[in-house]
Image: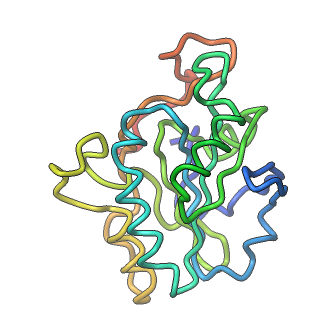
Amino acid sequence: MAFTLSPGSKAPDFSLRATDGNTYSLKDFKNAKVLVIFFTCNHCPYVTGSDEVTRKTADKFAPQDVMFVGINSNSPNTYTEDSFENMVKRMKQYKFPWLYLYDATQDIARAYGALRTPHFFVFNKEKKLVYTGRGVDNPRETSKMTVNNLENALEELLAGKEITTPITNPIGCNVKWEGKDAHWMPPDACDLV
């Protein structure tokens, strides 16, 4: 699991521009009891298929100081829909309850070991990773989902319990790496379980 952060790892810092015009780094979320960082994009059917479920989860846990931060690391040269301008349009249209950051260099996707869109990373108050993987087991067709791993992990964490399933395989499109074929994955990227 060398490519992707392992449970217990500290959240790598970042300094990324958001669709709201501001730049954010990890210290901006120091007061969050839980920080959910997820790699996402504008075009992927697994993202668009599950965004409303993610919205419900973000809204449900917001009163408990759980913050959600979406990061788009996809190359707009692979899919023009994933450009920063289109990120701004998408947030204006859908008004998602999370910040939406742009990883133009893809350095943050590498630092976290993002494999797919969406790929979720849940950090506790100390910003240590407690869960990584999918949000739900059928993000493309959430009407057919049977488990919400993200919600389960958040409920256990906030209840002070050990996370029953700290790692799942993210389900979605691979990150679109600059200068690579649309389906290319880094050689050391692999399934997490």
Name the quadrant of the C terminus.
Answer: top left
Task: Decide which of 137, 79 is in the foreground and name it.
Answer: 79
| Residue 46 place in picture, x, y as percent | 37, 38
**Residue at 56% in and 46% down:** 39
Question: For residue 2, which quarter of the picture?
Answer: top right
Task: Decide which of 55, 170 is in the foreground and name it.
Answer: 55
In this rendering, position of residue 23 left or right of residue 186? right
The correct choice, above or below, for 1 with respect to 184 in the image is: below
**Residue at 53% in and 59% down:** 96
Question: For residue 161, which quarter of the picture?
Answer: bottom left
The correct choice, above or below, for 61 with respect to 133 in the image is: below
Question: For residue 90, which quarter of the picture?
Answer: top right
| Residue 130 place in picture, x, y as percent | 50, 67
**Residue at 64% in and 35% down:** 86
| Residue 58 place in picture, x, y as percent | 47, 69
In this rendering, position of residue 129 left or right of residue 151? right
| Residue 148 place in picture, x, y as percent | 28, 62
Q: Disc count in the image?
A: 0
Task: Decide which of 185, 90 is in the foreground and name it.
Answer: 90
**Residue at 67% in and 16% down:** 77
The correct choice, above or below, for 30 with respect to 173 in the image is: below
The scheme the figure's colours follow is: rainbow
Q: Residue furthest front?
A: 93
Task: Decide which of 177, 95 is in the foreground and name it.
Answer: 95
The correct choice, above or below, for 27 with respect to 18 in the image is: below
